[in-house]
Image: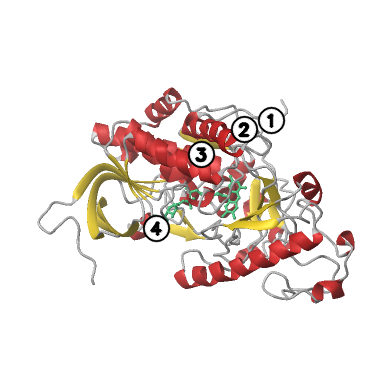
């Protein structure tokens, strides 16, 4: 049976002041801020759960909620975090990390969106954008009710992958720009591969960080498990030999390719576990596949299947060889693959890695980031590329959320306008939530004033964000 149009033909398409595409960290905060600002708001999300990577991807460690020295950024971000911590302590008990609770997070996010007055369509995919003049007039969506057009005044792309900005014909970068490290030679980034410093490997454009399928293990003695965390391990460290590793059924399968050296071959090159809200349950960030374009359906499908096998192998490996995991079991695998990097808007301003590292200030700052430069190596050399910021936090300018052509579109979260290096910090969850709140607040203000978001006074937007609890902090030295 072919899908029917809804509403029935002859009925006018539903119309909103603000439509937010994508219900992840950024989109949820955008929808809440927009609805609280008095705009008739719709949030559409292709999955049945809100939260995106935070919940569907089981990515529980929420970074950049405060400056490096611990000053909170406030806003909707902290309203949500405080509620998640209170509720997860009640539901999961004491003893874990109360902020790392994807099930509670998903429920809190849904309730907060409903309480804000925003409408939500779950299980709803964005298919197409209809342009009219300098803006978007309507979006075509698909869900169980069939196909429909919905109209809006202002649109927010919070899809992570920049689906809407691409549909609207905006310029974007997919992965790295060629020679992106060239302007970073004087920043003192301490974890850049020599060949990247001399611009070798990074002359290629389109390199994207690897994808990862998170999973959790129960019955873990976390105090012991954390002793080996984030370390490269040799066979000797684990009391085994290369020959013994070669006997494992998954030796030489993707991610476990055995080299000549003494390092244990693991997809992420190391053990990477964190605590969750449930005592004895560890979140594991150790599966990894490189060369996967998250905007290519075939590549994504292959990666989902390969990563699920990696997870099974990793669970077996952890149980057999890593102290603290002896009595553990595989508890759950994330419903969806975690995609770190795909499209990024080339907007009115492109925030650069150098600006993030040097903790730049901007007159039109609408959010701040504080996470280190953290590029999981797109070339799979099993080493992160990055380094610490030189101050406490950096500003994200309003112009980095604004496309060049489409006047009624705002872009927030993982796909805002930053280069490959800056993106490795702006993609972190706390920062995505802050840019989401800024986008939703601006959309509601623009709708109320009957103007395009790009015509908004940045000072008025900053004042409204402050009034709504967002804190802007000095960017200087965190040690001061
Ligand atoms: C493996 C991994 C590890 C990470 N580790 C950390 C960490 O330790 N700490 C940290 O803070 N951050 C971490 N991050 C980064 C962080 O989780 C994400 O960058 C951030 O959550 C992105 O938020 P977002 O809202 O911009 O995008 P997403 O979370 O991707 O949300 C986008 C939403 O839009 C929906 N969507 C997409 N396309 C469509 C469409 N066409 N129609 C309808 N809906 C659509 C998606 O289903 C999704 O819900 C990690 C990310 C990954 C993948």
Labels 3, 2: front one:
2
- Give coordinates of residue 176: x percent, y percent: 56, 60
In the rendered image, the vertical position of residue 256 relative to residue 395, given as above or below: below
Q: Which mark is residue 478?
A: 1
Residue positioned 59% across, 66% down in the render = 308
Q: Earlier in the sequence, mark 2 or mark 1?
A: 2
N-term-proximal mark, 3 vs 2: 2
Name the N-terminal-most of marks 1 and 3. 3
Residue that label 3 marks? 396
Q: Is mark 2 within 8 Å of ligand 1?
A: no
Mark pair 4, 3: CA separation:
22 Å
Q: CA distance from mark 1 to mark 3?
A: 18 Å
Horizontal side, residue 453 vs residue 59: left or right: left
Does the rendering let one see residue 439?
Answer: no
Beta carbon of the mark 4 residue lies under 8 A of ligand 1: yes
How far apart in space, not on screen, are marks 3 and 2 (Cα)?
14 Å
Q: Is mark 3 within 8 Å of ligand 1?
A: no
Rounded to the nearest angstrom, the CA distance separating label 4 from label 1 is 37 Å
Q: Position of residue 389 (x, y in %)?
A: 67, 40
Query: Can I make out residue 74 in this image?
Result: yes
Q: Nearer the viewer, residue 472 or 237?
A: 237
Residue hosting label 2:
67
Report how far apart the C-alphas of labels 2 and 1 lie in the structure: 8 Å
Mark 4 or 1: in front is 4
Q: Residues within 10 Å of mark 3 (few under 14, many from 20)?
A: many
Res 163 label = 4
């Amino acid at each position: 049976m072919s899908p029917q149009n809804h509403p029935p033909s002859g009925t006018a398409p539903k119309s909103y002041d603000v439509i937010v595409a994508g219900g992840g960290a950024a989109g949820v905060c955008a929808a809440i801020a927009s609805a609280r600002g008095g705009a008739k708001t719709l949030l559409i999300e292709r999955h049945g759960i809100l939260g995106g990577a935070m919940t569907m991807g089981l990515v529980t460690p929420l970074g950049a909620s405060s400056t490096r020295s611990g000053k909170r950024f406030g806003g909707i971000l902290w309203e949500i975090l405080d509620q998640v911590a209170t509720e997860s302590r009640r539901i999961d008990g004491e003893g874990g990390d109360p902020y790392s609770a994807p099930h509670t997070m998903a429920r809190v996010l849904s309730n907060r969106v409903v309480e804000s007055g925003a409408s939500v369509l779950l299980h709803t995919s964005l298919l197409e954008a209809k342009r009219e003049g300098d803006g978007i007039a309507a979006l075509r969506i698909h869900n169980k009710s069939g196909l429909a057009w919905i109209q809006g005044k202002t649109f927010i792309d919070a899809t992570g992958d920049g689906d809407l900005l691409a549909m609207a014909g905006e310029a974007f970068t997919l992965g790295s720009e060629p020679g992106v490290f060239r302007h970073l030679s004087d920043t003192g980034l301490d974890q850049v591969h020599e060949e990247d410093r001399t611009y070798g490997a990074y002359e290629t454009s389109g390199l994207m960080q690897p994808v990862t399928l998170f999973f959790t293990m129960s019955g873990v003695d976390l105090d012991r498990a954390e002793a080996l965390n984030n370390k490269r391990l040799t066979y000797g460290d684990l009391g085994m030999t290369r020959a013994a590793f070669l006997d494992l059924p998954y030796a030489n399968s993707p991610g476990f390719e055995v080299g000549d050296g003494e390092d244990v071959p693991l997809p992420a090159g190391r053990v990477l576990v964190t605590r969750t809200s449930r005592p004895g349950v560890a979140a594991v960030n150790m599966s990894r596949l490189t060369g996967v374009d998250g905007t290519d359906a075939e590549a994504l499908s292959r990666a989902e299947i390969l990563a699920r096998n990696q997870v099974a192998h990793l669970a077996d490996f952890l149980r057999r060889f890593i102290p603290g995991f002896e009595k553990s079991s595989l508890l759950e695998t994330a419903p969806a693959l975690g995609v770190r990097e795909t499209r990024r808007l080339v907007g009115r301003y492109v925030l650069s890695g150098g600006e993030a590292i040097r903790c730049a200030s901007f007159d039109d700052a609408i959010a701040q980031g504080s996470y280190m430069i953290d590029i999981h190596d797109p070339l799979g050399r099993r080493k992160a590329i990055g380094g610490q910021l030189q101050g406490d936090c950096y500003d994200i300018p309003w112009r980095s959320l604004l496309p060049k052509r489409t006047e009624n579109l705002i872009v927030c979260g993982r796909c805002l306008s930053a280069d490959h290096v800056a993106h490795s910090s702006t993609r972190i969850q706390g920062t995505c939530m802050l840019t989401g709140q800024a986008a939703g607040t601006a959309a509601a203000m623009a709708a109320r004033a009957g103007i395009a978001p790009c015509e908004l006074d940045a000072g008025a937007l900053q004042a409204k964000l402050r009034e709504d609890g967002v804190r802007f902090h000095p960017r200087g030295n965190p040690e001061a």
